[in-house]
Amino acid sequence: MVLSFKLFACALALTLAGCAMQSKNYDKFIAANPRSILVLPPKNQSTDIHGTYSFLSTVTMPIAEKGFYIFPVTVVDQMMKENGLPSANEMHEVSLKKIKEIINPDAVLYITLHEYGTKFVVIQSQTTVVASGRLVSTASGEVIWEGQTHQVIASDSGGGGIAGLVVNAMVSQAVNSSVDYAHNVSSIASRDLFMTEGQGLLNGPYNPASTK
Amino acid sequence: MKINFLNSHRVSLNIIILSLFLAILSSCVSPTKYYWGEYENILYTQSQEPGRATPEYQIEKLQSDIQIAASKGKPLPPGFYAHLGYQYLQIGKAGDARKYFTAEKMAFPESTVLMNRFIAKLK
């Protein structure tokens, strides 16, 4: 009896947690119906210079697995640099018309990294990644989706706890440095931003679950 | 009675911990549509340690991914072939660059405008 009540309470709590956030309005996203997304290198407002390219290297998997064509992020970055755009800030200023002519994506994703990095507090470290994204249709110039993610992950020096477990599970190259630790939290933030049901992107044409 | 109560309490706590653990585990091993291999790791290494991620290093890793993806029967993700073609371009191997830019276009027609732009420059 006690057991079943506790399981019920647990299930209820999980359901409530899932419903707590109201789903976004996707009318403009559905109307624009994008197939392909160009992600520009994120603008970096944090003090850590690694942030932009750490975050950029984590966006391909969630966006592709959601079912979109995502342009090769590093190739596009290098191409823009070779064409006189040395940083993310300049790349974000390029007109949609020009982007459409040269690359031809259905939508452009503009990301801003608000916080990125690890703080050490005696035997604990706390890694924070805060980012927001804005998806703009190249056909209409309208913002068709906006989202944000706020990840704060603490760990003791042993990297234990459930948070540590999740982070460790995501490390494919286990390197013990704060830079790589923040990079792993970038991966979590990126999945959260794009894949969270009711908040992230809708399913794209390459997703088998898509009804399109 | 008291012992029984404590036991059932412990069992339910264990079940909750176990189910949480399984939920986390299953979210980590959920099957992906694409074979990801080293592609995203390479993007990260190239940005943080460009000296290590030379075009030759990247080509070796990505070619190995092509073999593994084929053996698993999974497609490679968007951008993979374009990135590989771009590495061949860096070391002056125009024929290989053309091959992989074309492969990207075949796999994902959305890339046609950009791939044609790269291919046109090879001539």
Image (cartoon, coloured by chain):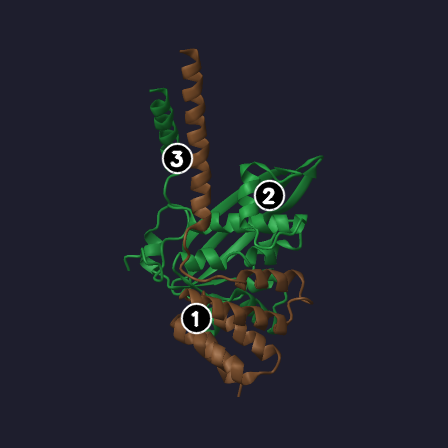
Residue A36 in the figure: left or right of residue A189: left
**Residue at 68% from the left image edge and 49% from the top image edge:** A177
Q: Residues within 10 Å of mark 2 (few under 14, many from 20)?
A: many
* Three-letter residue code for mark 1: Asn
Q: Amino acid at mark 3?
A: Ala
Label 3 crowd (10 A; few <14 / some 14-19 / many >=20):
few
Marks 3 and 1 sit apart, C-alpha to C-alpha, by 38 Å
Q: Nearer the viewer, residue A34 or B108?
A: B108
The disc numbered 2 marks a residue on which chain?
Answer: A
Instruction: In the picture, one chain is brown; tell me its letter.
Output: B
Q: Is residue A175 left or right of residue B13?
A: right
Left or right placement of residue A183 versus residue A97 in this view: right
Residue beneath disc 1: A104
Q: Are marks 1 and 2 on the same chain?
A: yes
Q: Residue furthest left?
A: A211
In the image, is residue A84 above or below residue A68?
Answer: below
Q: Colour of chain A?
A: green
Q: Does the residue at mark 2 contact the one at mark 3 (Cβ under 8 Å)?
A: no
**Pointer 3: what residue?**
A20
Q: Earlier in the sequence, mark 2 or mark 3?
A: 3
Q: Which residue is mark 2?
A: A128
Residue at x 43% of width, y 20% of height = B7
Counting residues from the N terminus, which is met first, the one under dot 3 or under dot 1?
Answer: 3
Q: Residue at x 55, y 59 (%)?
A: A57
Real-space Cα distance between discs 1 and 2? 34 Å
